[in-house]
Amino acid sequence: MPGKSAFMHFFERERLPGDMVFAVAFFLFAIFLISQLGDQALWTRRTRLFAQPAFWPTVSLAGMLLFAFLHCIGSLVSPRVPGRGSEVLFWIRSLEYSAWFLVYVWSVPRIGYLGATLLFTLFLTYRAGYRTKRMFASAAAVAMGIVVIFKAFLQVRIPSGAVYEYLPNGIRNFMLLYL
């Protein structure tokens, strides 16, 4: 629009279908986090303000609350656009990947880091729609690379799988240490 600044154009935009749902959820989440701040971050005596353990978390959560509130106001004054329900359902569908990650975390102590990572990457490759042999081979190579880098080179301590107990001694020791 001629004669209008980009700033004004931003505030005259149409509200996205799920914008209000997101704004309210974000605002409520900010309130929840601030309500937990007293138990999680401490103010200590004889410490400068910027060195206080609770100062920066308080500043960041206050900013989060302020901007969530402004987002709610902006969503209220913007014109409505149909399709909010379908957009919210799209957001909820994305939580599927969080559930798969929880399954992965649950499976690591049972089948081991190597097995869980390999199965997880292959399954997500299939789930994302990549179904060629080349994609599965690439996913398996990435999984093996991740395991080798984290366990062998970085020496990250990850619980071994219960399935390793059924392996012969030499192989079990190698799997426990490196895979």
Image (tube, rainbow, N blue to C red):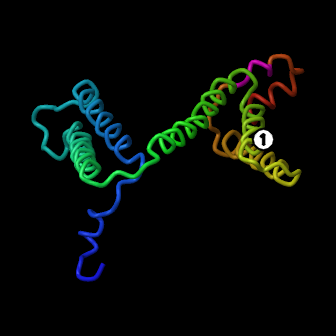
Quadrant holding the C terminus: top right
Residue 161 within the magenta-colored segment of the rendering: yes
Residue 114, position in %: x, y?
76, 34
Residue 8 within the magenta-colored segment of the rendering: no
Q: State the residue in front, 145 or 80.
A: 80
Q: State the residue in front, 128 or 73.
A: 73
| Quarter of image, res 54 | top left
Q: Secondary structure at mark 1?
A: helix
Magenta span dominant secondary structure:
helix
Q: State the residue in front, 21 or 102.
A: 21
Task: Name which residue lies at 28% across and 49% down.
Answer: 71
Task: Name which residue lies at 80% across and 17% down.
Answer: 165
Q: Which residue is mark 1?
A: 122
Is 23 located above or below residue 111 in the figure? below
| Quarter of image, res 160 | top right
Task: Name which residue lies at 17% across and 32% down.
Answer: 43
Q: Of the residues shown, which amino acid type is indicated by label 1?
A: Leu
Give the extent of the magenta segment. 160-164
Residue 164, position in %: x, y?
80, 22
Instruction: Give the mark count.
Output: 1
Quadrant holding the N terminus: bottom left
Q: State the residue in front, 66 or 49.
A: 66
Task: Name which residue lies at 52% across and 36% down.
Answer: 92
Residue 106, position in %: x, y?
64, 23
Relative to residue 155, is residue 85 drawn left or right? Answer: left
Residue pushed farthest bottom? 2
Relative to residue 165, is residue 19 drawn left or right? Answer: left
